[in-house]
Amino acid sequence: MRGGGGGGGGIPIFISRRSIPLKFRQLSGGPSLKLKFLLSWSAVSFVLFLLLLPVLFIGAGRWRRPSHLTASPPPPGKGYTILINTWKRNDLLKQSVTHYASCVGVESIRVVWSEHDRPSDSLQDALWQSVQKSSKRCDDIELKFDLHEENSLNNRFKQVEGLKTDAVFSVDDDVLFPCASMELAFSAWQSAPTAMVGFVPRMHWMDKMAGTNKEYYKYGGWWSVWWKGTYSMVLSKATFFHKKYLYMYTNHMPASIRNYVTKYRNCEDIAMSFLVANTTRAPPIWVKGKIFEIGSSGISSLGDHSEKRSHCLNLFANIYGHMPLVATSMKVIDSRHSWLW
């Protein structure tokens, strides 16, 4: 199955042999469809609620074992590594490490540490005890700190020596995803291991500057994705990718892009999206899943955030000599928790 669009071929998706049933659904496109959907959905929802009300009461007393607890750990080297980017938020780091250690597919947790002071012994001991208590694996989950002298957002994508797995899940310390959602996304990544597979989609499109005929690339957040029905990036705050891209980001991506990221402390995720798209000539894969934000708002809450991101799109496209990002309208959902096929 292929999801395409935006001037490039899609990634061939092969259903994984793992037991998770994946469903690839095409996003509804266009504002007119969205308006019709909103007008009709309220009536349909009310009718469905009346029909399902008896079922809801009957099943209210039943308990289902969480799906991630029934899964078996993958063989050594066939799971994934959690790469957590953190900065002076040890309480959030502890929550993240404790949670992700409970997911059966996790073999290793690497903490990207860019603070001037080294992590204290008490912090390391507390994290290690949390991993030991939370892990569902028979063997120990690896826990390591990757120390960086320079405070740069590029650190989250620096080459990591000694990674035990090909799959890497890059995540911020202030977002959590249920283990079932992680397992679903990992299955999707196994079907397309050269792609970026993530939970937070974003998009770009060509626009015209006000009062001129000059065209430029514009960055769009979640509401743009929802309205237009397409996306061309998945943010690295919650994304699976192959470990080879860490080496490529560090050694092969244009140095001027890394310098920009260091200087302006922004757009490292767009830089990684450019790198992967330029390599694969294919779009990323969005996995629909629940997200729990446990921290305060970051730079995305600032008023000029979209303008700065648009500037990055145009600057990076100029450096590459073309726009490598490929749009698509496909998403992955878990058929176990979806009413409609």
Image: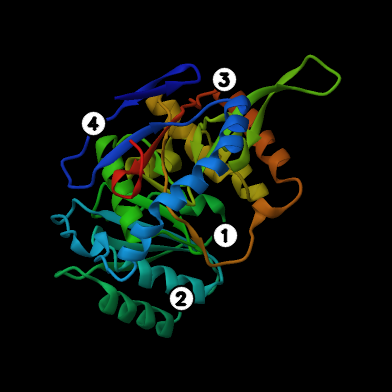
Where is mark 1, residue-wise?
Answer: 151
Q: Nearer the viewer, mark 4 or mark 3?
A: 4
Q: Residues within 10 Å of mark 3 (few under 14, many from 20)?
A: few
Front-most of 246 and 46?
Answer: 46
Q: Earlier in the sequence, mark 2 or mark 4?
A: 4
Q: Secondary structure at mark 2?
A: loop
Q: Marks 4 and 3, Cα distance to the nearest angstrom?
A: 32 Å
Where is mark 4, residue-wise?
Answer: 14
Where is mark 2, residue-wise?
Answer: 119
Q: Earlier in the sequence, mark 1 or mark 2?
A: 2
Contact between marks 2 and 3 (CB within 8 A): the answer is: no
Q: Marks 2 and 3, Cα distance to the nearest angstrom?
A: 41 Å
Q: Marks 1 and 2, Cα distance to the nearest angstrom?
A: 15 Å
Up-down relation of residue 58 to residue 235 (above or below): below
Label 1 is placed on what type of residue?
Asn
Q: Earlier in the sequence, mark 3 or mark 1?
A: 1
At 52% from the left and 30% from the top, the residue drawn is 230
Label 3 is placed on what type of residue?
Gly
Contact between marks 1 and 2 (CB within 8 A): the answer is: no
